[in-house]
Amino acid sequence: MRIGTLGLVLPLVVGFATGGFAAAVSANGAHLRALDKISGVAYDIDLKRGETVAFKQLTISLHDCRYPSEDPTSNAYASLTIQDDVQRLRLFDGWMIADSPALSALDHHRYDVWVVRCDTP
């Protein structure tokens, strides 16, 4: 699914997940979690909107993190780009949804990365 198409589907997912159609608000950042599947160690990653961080052999960029305005703790939707620096491949470029991580997931042999929440007031 192209990013543009997912951008059209995202408001529908927000609507169904919250029981109605609520406006989405952009947050200043996001809280992600990464799992090293070989060692079994989980890492927390905090990113600000527009920030890029290096995590092991991955480079993770956060473009935006949105949440429903009526219930900030209910879900998070993060626009991410994740690249593998060793293989020089773009592994993920799109929206990840905290409540449905398998819907749009990173596919990597060693690492899992998912959205936990947006930074909310």
Image (cartoon, helix red, strand yellow):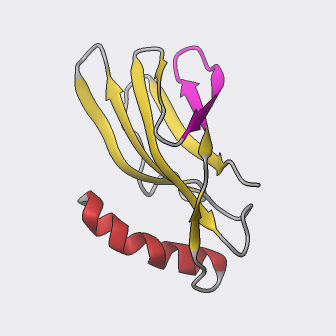
Magenta stretch: dominant SS? strand
Q: Quadrant of the N terminus?
A: bottom left
| x, y percent for residue 51 | 48, 33
Determine the image quadrant of residue 89: top left
Q: Position of residue 104 (x, y in %)?
A: 41, 53
Q: What is the number of callouts on the image? A: 0
Highlighted range, magenta: 32-48
Q: Quadrant of residue 85?
A: top left
Residue drawn at point x = 60 percent, y = 44 percent:
29
> Which residue is rendered at x = 57% and y = 35% of the image?
47
Q: Position of residue 8 (x, y in %)?
A: 34, 74
Query: Closer to the camera, 6 or 65?
Result: 65
Q: Is residue 1 above or below residue 61?
A: below
- Of residue 91 and residue 3, the one placed in the foreground of this image is 3
Does the magenta run of residues contain 77? no
Q: Position of residue 78 (x, y in %)?
A: 50, 51
Location of residue 107 with respect to 89 vertically, above or below: below
**Magenta region includes residue 37:** yes
Q: Residue furthest bottom?
A: 20
Which quarter of the rendering shows the C terminus?
bottom right
Residue 87 lies, with reference to residue 91, above or below; the image says: above
Q: Residue at x 68, y 48 (%)?
A: 119
Question: Residue visible at 37% across and 34% down?
Answer: 82
